[in-house]
Amino acid sequence: MTTPIKVEKTVTIDKPAEDLYRFWHNFENLPRFTRHLKNVKVYDDRRSHWIISAPLDSSVEWDAEIVDDRPNELIAWKSVAGADIDNAGSVQFKPAPGDRGTEVRVVTAYNPPAGAIGDALAKPVADIATLFGENPKQQIGDDLARFKMLMEAGEIATNDGQPSGRHNSKD
């Protein structure tokens, strides 16, 4: 039995909780700022299907259900039986101190996968935490930073396709 990996991150976004909650609650929006999330298909007001990129050019999929939904405050979910990765999480929206917008707190927990993908990832425990090639806490932090940019600026700043700044001259 593996120990679940739990990650908690918080970001303050200069937008009202209602706007952030409404955007996040439409799970089909999440791949817009969540790097490894390929697709979310919403079945109904409680259930959805998630597909994420995994190592070795593979994908991991599961169905999830909302287990707690408090408009403009909290969305909590968990995977249903048979998921490739047993997982659960929540996103909480609360007023930031000093009327500075909304604090968005994400908590996720998952058990590393078993089966073929798990076998491919059978490494020391320290490496399991880097399921997708990066630290899960850093990954969630990066996703929240992109969410913040998207909500505050309407777009995600990126340097994809930009020159690296290195110059290789033959002077």
Image (spheres, helix red, strand yellow):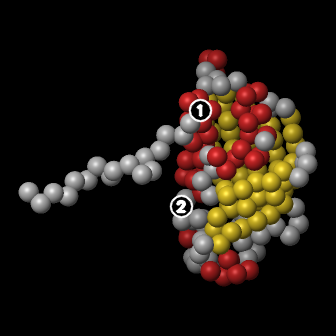
- Name the side, left or right, on which 101 lies relative to 91: left
Q: Which numbered circle lies on residue 154?
A: 1
Q: Amino acid at mark 1?
A: Gly
Q: Which numbered circle lies on residue 169?
A: none
In this view, 143 is above or below 36: above
Q: Quadrant of the N terminus?
A: bottom right
Q: Quadrant of residue 123?
A: bottom right
Q: Amino acid at mark 2?
A: Glu
Question: Can residue 1 be seen in this snapshot?
Answer: yes
Q: Give the image location of residue 54, x and y in percent.
A: 63, 68
Q: How many marks?
A: 2
Q: Nearer the viewer, mark 1 or mark 2?
A: 1
Q: Label 2, on which residue?
A: 134
- Name the side, left or right, on which 129 lies relative to 28: left
29, 97: nearer the viewer? 29
- Name the side, left or right, on which 114 lies relative to 143: right
Q: Residue at x 66, y 82 (%)?
A: 119
- First reached walking from the N terminus: tag 1 or tag 2: 2
Look at the numbered disc 1 and give the secondary structure of its residue.
loop
Q: Residue at x 54, y 52 (%)?
A: 138
**Disc 2: CA contacts within 10 A as few (<14), some (14-19) or many (>=20):** few
